[in-house]
Amino acid sequence: YKRELQQLKGKASITLDERHVELAGNIGSPKDVEGLINNDAEGVGLYRTEFLYMDKEDAFPTEEEQYEAYKAVLEGMDNKPIVIRTLDIGGDKELPYFKMDEEMNPFLGYRAIRICLDKTEIFKTQLRALYRASVHGRLRIMFPMISSLGELLSAKEIIKEVLAELDKEGIAYSKDVEVGMMIEIPSAAVISDILAKHVDFFSIGTNDLIQYTCAVDRMNQKISHLYNQFNPAVLRLIKMVIDNAHKEGKWVGMCGESAGDKRMIPILLGMGLDEFSMSPISILPARKFITSVKYEDMKKFADEVLSLSTAEEIKNHVDKTFNF
Ligand code: PEP
Ligand code: MG
């Protein structure tokens, strides 16, 4: 089996009837690039930049420190597309040097893009570093936790301000940076037809999308039986997001854990997902599956899945159809 996986290195991730998808990796630091290369990732689908901030003890990382980290990933991945997510703190992720009030519901509170739109100097420093690094590869910038069109437009407005500053200072940046957002809040999924007009891409964050759709805290062991990626409500939202994006000619990825899950991949492939971003060790097994099936068959399979009523039925249908 291991040898079979090795032989898939350098091969395209393409179905028997020639549907091509991108298999990318999730990383938390430039050090993780090696693991991606070893597993033949076709890009980075999620660079969680919050670790850059969490590793510091007494101050935010400087523009220069950030620039070096982003450049290292862009250069290290040899001109493959790199999705870098802007700061996603709050929830369970804290910074020792940034005091946040205690909240009743941190996952519903002051976090991620909400902080960036409030403390714009933090956001601008990151965006400057990102655009400066953009000359070193193929950069895709992604906003986390967008819940409305207003937030997306505000974030894009701040990009405009940053680019005007860079222009004024004569600092070079790539004109081909794609700007996208995560779909990890149900309100964003529901208005994804509207949001799709204003982005280059979506990436679905199932870790949070499941938690918010089902009102199940993703960290709470006591209710973990209710946290289920096969929940038909979650799957319908995913399908809706993919269809809405495609209607606008935009591509859709997924960077939540489900993207690398062998039981989810046939469903997602059949729904038309364009990019799958996962932990590096899942990439070659995913390619093995994708290159062994027909997209037309997976489409039919996804339709069958979407006609079922419960997570249990769906999981059973997956297990009965495939020998996992
Ligand atoms: C997600 O919510 O699915 C996601 C990829 O982001 P994180 O796990 O960092 O919240
Ligand atoms: Mg998330």
Image (cartoon, grey):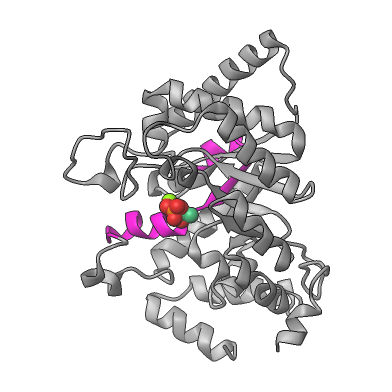
Q: Position of residue 292 (x, y in %)?
A: 75, 81
Residue closer to the observer: 42 or 96: 96
Q: Is residue 96 left or right of residue 300?
A: left
- Specify the quadrant of the image occupied by residue 290: bottom right
Magenta: main secondary structure = helix
Ligand 1 is located in which of the four quadrants?
bottom left
In the picture shown, does residue 285 fall above or below 219?
below
Q: Position of residue 200 (x, y in %)?
A: 65, 38
Q: Is any part of residue 200 visible from this angle?
A: no
Is 208 inside the magenta-drawn segment? yes
Is 255 inside the magenta-drawn segment? no
Question: In this picture, which residue range is highlighted in magenta?
Answer: 192-217
Q: Residue at x 41, y 44 (%)?
A: 54
In the picture shown, does residue 246 fall above or below 222?
above
Q: Residue at x 39, y 63 (%)?
A: 233
- Specify the quadrant of the image occupied by residue 65: top right
Q: Residue at x 53, y 52 (%)?
A: 28
Residue closer to the observer: 103 or 99: 99
Q: Is residue 159 left or right of residue 118?
A: right
Residue placed farthest to the front in the image?
A: 57
Residue closer to the observer: 49 or 254: 49
Q: Is any part of residue 286 visible from this angle?
A: yes
Say which quadrant the C terminus sits in. bottom right
Q: Residue at x 76, y 40 (%)?
A: 137
Q: How many marks?
A: 0
Say which quadrant the N terminus sits in. bottom right
Residue closer to the observer: 230 or 175: 175
In the picture shown, does residue 121 fall above or below 40?
above
Q: Position of residue 89 (x, y in %)?
A: 38, 42
